[in-house]
Image: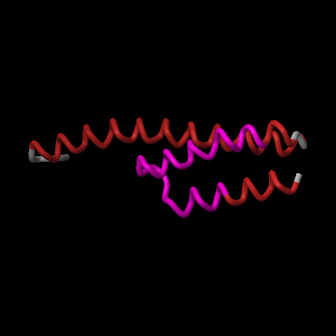
């Protein structure tokens, strides 16, 4: 267990940040999943719309430090490649 006041504060802070970051990651996954479901259905229009909505979410995740820059870039690239192939 933490002994110093600052260590106790960090434990509380880490717990609250973990909840917030978990919600952000979940939100990003939801947007990406919308693109993937549209791709699975073969609906190009819906896939393009979902991709345009997912790209800023991925970028926001990078800006908030929830996901790595290269990870977001790779996901955007792969999704846009699949949408273009429809």
- Relative to 27, 19 lies left or right: left
Bounds of the magenta segment: 48-76
* Model colouring: secondary structure
Q: Does 36 sit above or below residue 81?
A: above
Which image quarter: residue 18?
Answer: top left
Residue 39 painted magenta:
no
71 and 20: which is toward the camera: 71
> Residue 60 location, x and y as percent?
49, 45
User: Image quarter for residue 57?
Assistant: top right
User: Residue visible at 25% across and 37% down?
Assistant: 12
Q: Position of residue 25 (x, y in %)?
A: 52, 43
Query: Residue 71, how many percent across, how many down?
Result: 56, 60
Along the viewing direction, whichever of 1 and 62 lies nearer the viewer: 62
The residue located at (90%, 43%) in the rendering is 42
Task: Please determine whether, in this image, residue 79 is positioned above or below residue 52.
Answer: below
Q: Main secondary structure of the magenta part?
A: helix
Q: Is residue 73 magenta?
A: yes
Left of 70 or right of it: where is 38? Answer: right
Task: Work out whether residue 4 or residue 71 is closer to the camera in this orientation and state it.
Answer: 71
Identity of the residue furthest to the left in this view = 4
Number of numbered discs: 0
Identity of the residue drawn at 74% across and 54% down? 80
The location of residue 51, given as percent across then percent down, is 71, 44
Q: Along the horizontal axis of the image, is 82 left or right of 42?
A: left
């Amino acid at each position: 267990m933490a002994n110093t006041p600052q260590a106790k504060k960090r434990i509380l802070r880490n717990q609250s940040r973990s909840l917030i970051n978990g919600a952000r990651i979940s939100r990003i996954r939801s947007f990406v999943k919308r693109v993937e479901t549209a791709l699975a259905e073969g609906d190009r229009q819906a896939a393009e719309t979902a991709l345009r909505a997912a790209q800023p979410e991925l970028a926001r995740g990078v800006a908030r430090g929830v996901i790595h820059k290269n990870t977001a870039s790779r996901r955007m690239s792969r999704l846009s490649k699949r949408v273009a192939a429809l």
